[in-house]
Image (tube, helix red, strand yellow):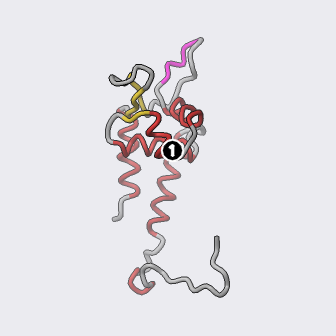
């Protein structure tokens, strides 16, 4: 929401100290979004957020924890995970996913799955991290 006319907006870093780079983080974010958009029409911002949660976990993470961190419902989280997961695409099975994450049964709860990145997902996560990193 934009500030009211009587509110004074104080920049976090004075413009003179920014050296004209005040929008550099947004430019990096825009470049990362473009990488995601160029991948596949199914990779919307909510699915990208679920991917980011899995990548940031650094190892296996439960679907419940992914949903909690992404702020998505159970059904939305499952839909995004199916889009990201490597599916076979065989007749009678779910559609082929993007192959960015993989799932395995939890050794602690037979009903739960744990999700982690595939090698393709790891490459994408590294590419996004490098794009977002300050120069």
Which residue is at the front of the view, 78 or 43?
78
Side of 21 relative to 1 (left or right): left
Residue most extreme to the top: 92
Residue positioned 53% across, 29% down in the render: 82
Total labels drawn: 1
Task: Give the answer, above or below, for where 15 lies relative to 63.
Answer: below
Residue positioned 54% across, 24% down in the render: 96
Is residue 88 shown in magenta?
yes
Task: Give the answer, above or below, for where 126 lies relative to 110.
Answer: below
Which picture quadrant has residue 83? top right
Which picture quadrant has residue 20? bottom left
Residue positioned 44% across, 45% down in the render: 52
**Judging from the image, what secondary structure is the residue with disc 1 in?**
helix
Q: Which residue is the site of mark 1?
A: 48
Highlighted range, magenta: 87-91
Quarter of the image with the C terminus is: bottom left
- Rendering coords of residue 89 (x, y %): 54, 19
Query: Which is the main secondary structure of the residues drawn in magenta?
Result: loop
Side of 91 relative to 28 (left or right): right
Is residue 33 shown in magenta?
no
Task: Give the answer, above or below, for where 71 lies relative to 115.
Answer: below
Quarter of the image with the N terminus is: bottom right
Dot 1 crowding, Cα within 10 Å, few <14, some 14–19, many 20+: some
- Rendering coords of residue 34 (x, y %): 52, 51
Side of 45 relative to 21 (left or right): right
């Amino acid at each position: 929401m934009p500030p009211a006319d009587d509110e004074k907006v104080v920049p976090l870093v004075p413009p003179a100290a920014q050296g004209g780079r005040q929008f550099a983080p947004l430019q990096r974010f825009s470049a990362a979004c473009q990488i995601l958009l160029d991948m596949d029409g199914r990779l919307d911002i909510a699915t990208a957020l679920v991917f980011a949660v899995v990548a940031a976990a650094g190892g296996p993470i439960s679907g419940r924890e992914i949903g909690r961190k992404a702020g998505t419902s159970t059904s939305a989280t499952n839909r995004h995970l199916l889009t990201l997961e490597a599916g076979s695409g065989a007749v009678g099975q779910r559609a082929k996913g993007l192959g960015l994450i993989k799932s395995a049964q939890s050794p602690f709860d037979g009903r739960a799955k744990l999700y982690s990145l595939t090698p393709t997902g790891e490459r994408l996560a590294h590419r996004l991290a490098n794009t977002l990193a300050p120069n």
